[in-house]
Amino acid sequence: MNETMRSGLRWLCAGYLLALASAFGQTYFIATFVGHIRADLGLSAGGFGALYTAGTIASAVLLMSFGRIADAAQLRWIAAGVVVALAATTAGMAVVSAGWALLILLFGLRFFGQGLLIHIAMTAMGRWFPTMRGKAVAIVALGFPTGEALLPTLTVLGIDAYGWRTIWLIACGFLLLVTLPAILLLLAREPVRVRPAGPAGPDTPAAEEGWTRAEVLRDPMFFALQPGILAPPFVLTGIFISQTSLVAAKGWQLAWFAASVPVYAAVTVACSLVAGVVVDRLGARRVLPLYLLPLAASALTFALARDAWLLPVAMAFAGLTAGGANTLFGALWAELYGTAHLGAVRGLATSGLVFASALAPGMIGGLMDVGFAIETLLVCLAGYTLFAAATMAFVAGRLGGRGMRVRPRAAASPGDGR
């Protein structure tokens, strides 16, 4: 293995580890603690949902400003700082005793975990691997299903054995003793940009220049994409954060839900790898019309199922969309808008994803508090997903073939919003 290949492998491993570490700020992990947190702090479903929504919205707003840090040269130290901040937040969760403190800590989990760690990992892959972007993103995105496969069941078992606060201390230890040293080692030699030998791929010219964030905000197609882009985080967050209410309504055990999450993770892995090859061959935009349909099927299955054996079926449908989305949107922004300002552009897009995931807990928790059944809400989520899929089919036709979209040069101004 030559030095270029070894370096590329180190960078992929670093991205994978960042994606895995983001699990501690993801809904599926936090959701396993919801019942215990609500009981200890005296919160209703709507009360916890409101705090979760507020913290996540604050994270989304801040991410719009901080997204550009992924364009910095020294991502090694930026990534390390984010890992330390996330570790401090998990330590805080182990001792939280008041609603106001929980709000701050939920913000930290969502901002450093779900927000910055994922943003840094995916932006780096989009810039460092211009001719195999889809495959690189797919490999790094395997960190997500790894966490999804391992953590829910281990967390439920750990809470039963040691208590929920101890599990947060274990998470802090993993971040400081495993993730932090590994990131510093793997990114010791950081690239400016990886340019493999041989002919450039069809989207390589995008690395030479790219849209600024202000130019993207003037592009109607960016906003036309949003209903479909925001559907997975909104729907999946709604499902995972409501798992306690869902299993209670169905008469199931929470452990059954946790045990079915590895199915979701396994399907996510398989779909992510396949999507990486497809995206590199066809381009991300050509996959847009299809990836949401399994998510609609998942929401309907959760809503209508009466038998617990259908849980893995619903999880498998959700995994098909999650795997496609992980790879698809890791590559789409670089394909459409280039890589010169990819951190700023992707930060804008990621803040939208975080915002969508913020809305679901508050909306669903509030609607359940006023009497709506979880099954009814899941049917509504399926309907929204089908609408978003139809929107994506229309937008994909307007985006056309591969290559970076033409920049609105006449509209740009000096120093225009990175």
Image (cartoon, rainbow, N blue to C red):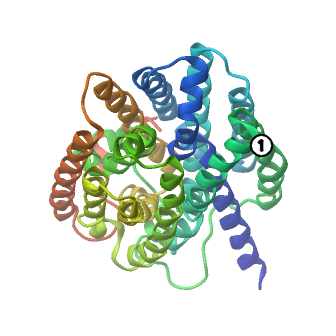
Read off the residue under disc 1. 170
Determine whether the residue tagged by mark 1 lies in a helix, strand or loop. helix
Height in image: 119 above or below 35?
A: below
Q: Looking at this rendering, what residue extends furthest in the front direction?
A: 251
Compare residues 413 and 7 and report the one nearer the observer.
Answer: 7
Horizontally, is 142 left or right of 379 in the view?
right
The residue sitting at 35% across, 46% down in the picture is 250
Q: What residue type is labelled 1?
A: Ile
Horizontally, is 273 left or right of 120 in the view?
left
Compare residues 393 and 142 and report the one nearer the observer.
Answer: 142
The residue sitting at 53% across, 32% down in the picture is 35
Residue 31: image x %, image y %?
52, 40
The residue sitting at 62% across, 63% down in the picture is 193
Horizontally, is 252 left or right of 285 in the view?
right
Height in image: 372 above or below 79?
A: above
Residue 237: image x %, image y %?
41, 43
Q: Quadrant of residue 271?
A: bottom left
Q: Can residue 406 be seen in this view?
A: no
Quadrant of the rendering where the N terminus is positioned:
bottom right
Compare residues 338 and 162 and report the one nearer the observer.
Answer: 162
Q: Can residue 18 be seen in this view?
A: yes
Q: How many labels does the image show?
A: 1
Q: Quadrant of residue 234?
A: top left
Residue 366: image x %, image y %?
33, 24
